Amino acid sequence: MSRGVEDVSKLTESTYKNVMEQFNPGLRNLVNLGKSYEKSVTAMNLAGKAYFEAVAKIGENATVSPVSRELGVVLMEIAEAHKKVHNELEDNFKRFHKDIITELEKKTEMDVKYMNATFKRYQSEHKLKQDSLERSQTDLKKLRRKSQGKHSSKYEIKENEYMETISSRQVDMQKFIADGCKEALLEEKRRFCFLADKHCMFSYQIVSFHEKAKDMLALRLPSWQEKCGDIGNVPDSVTTMIERLSTTPDQSPLVDRRNRNNMDSMVPPPAPPLKAQISPLATMFNPIPMSPITSSDRNSDQGSIGECSLSRSTSQSSGLNVGRKTKVRTIFPHTAGNNETLLSFDDGDIIVLLIQEEKDGWLYGELERTRQRGWFPSSYCRPYTEPVTSNSNLSTPVRSVSMASLPKQQEPEEVDAPVLLPPADYIDETPQSTVISSEPSPKNTRRESVCHGEAEADSHQ
């Protein structure tokens, strides 16, 4: 037997062994990895669907807004498109499991038995043919030893028969080895071809999946991008609503009539001709009833003292705002009746005096509660001082809230440092730093100290 025949026989055996010892175990490992691949894709699909469900919910919230309604619809459409993409991917992996994983499991179990039986059959037949050829060769050698004697001619015919038998068996052996090698190589190729063909089908499915995903996303993507491209774009309905709010609304007839009355009352009507009556109950509230404003009948000294006391009370009640008007609080109710120049009020109302001087027991002012103006008896009210909101000394300079809330141990430089506001979200511009001043106004401080000095002088007197 030639050397080439032996090499072919070895190739046949190695091919069978390669299929049984490497290819089939590789298929088992491939099945396990494919199942892990399916689980990971399924988990990814579940996470993706949950994510885009959350996107859709945010879109539903945005549809309530008059400005962001279109963006809410865009978010819902994006979420719906991606859900369809995930559904397509899920269908593709169902086919992947059916066409590849399931088929590989079947082929692996069947192929182990088939390849073992095929290889054993090849080995047994090869052994039989090899033994038959070797026996013929052994018989030929024995015959040639005998033919070396005197009667060599009578063994010549038998020798030729053995030679023909050996030659026939050698040809049969070569044909068997060639056919066995071809069959082994084809068996190997069939398995690789099956594996490649299955994954080609899966690749075609993935290509189809990506084409569908492209159709679902790429066609609608420009319109989505266009709607979220201009942040400053406001719907016409919202613009109209804002423009209506920015214009001056038409006043109702009631408000218009009240405004006309107020315009007419800018010039106070003349005081009532009769002198205002003094209520006999006024002495019950104050043994020495004093008018809230100095009368023209009183002397100048009392008038100046009363006026200064009212100005000081007003200054003390409002901090540094000395420019506030004098106010009084009513102690009795008053009804104007049919007289439109008089002012009606209840007990405890606050009236702002518009004329500082009293005329025959009448004062002219504006009721804070209704903004109505008119004359009213001066004995029906008392000076009103606004409550002081702080227990600290009035001469202490007023500081801002930011400075008052700082710890005492901080240095003045840290107290006077400007407060920088953080940048706003979702914009690229850097906002200008806003400085909050913590120093009191020199003008207000000077005015407060003057009033405080006047108060001390009155207390010494």
Image (tube, rainbow, N blue to C red):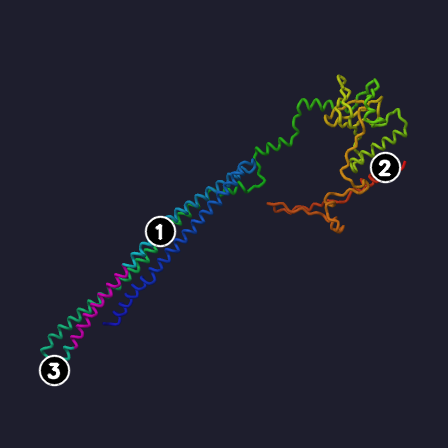
Can you say which quadrant of the picture contains the C terminus?
top right
Q: Nearer the viewer's eye, disc 2 or disc 3?
A: 2
361 on left or right of 425: right
Q: Are marks 3 and 1 in contact (CB under 8 Å)?
A: no
Q: Mostly what secondary structure, the magenta segment?
A: helix
Q: Are marks 2 and 3 in contact (CB under 8 Å)?
A: no
Provide residue 325's location: percent of width, then percent of height.
79, 31
The Cα–Cα distance between marks 1 and 2, rounded to whole angstroms, is 101 Å
Q: Residue at horizontal 13%, vertical 81%?
A: 148
| Neighbour tally class for label 3: few under 14, some 14-19, many 20 plus, Cα within 10 Å | few
Is residue 145 something that shows in the picture?
yes
- Is residue 13 depicted above or below 322 in this figure? below
Residue picked out by circle 2: 455
Magenta-colored span: 114-141
Provide residue 110's location: percent of width, then percent of height.
29, 56
Provide residue 10's location: percent of width, then percent of height.
28, 68
Circle nearer the N terminus (3, 1): 3
Label ID, residue 149: 3
Residue picked out by circle 1: 201
Per the image, is 329 magenta?
Answer: no
Provide residue 336's location: percent of width, then percent of height.
76, 19
Q: Residue at horizontal 63%, vertical 31%?
A: 245
Circle 3: residue type: Gly
- Is residue 260 depicted above or below 390 in this figure? above
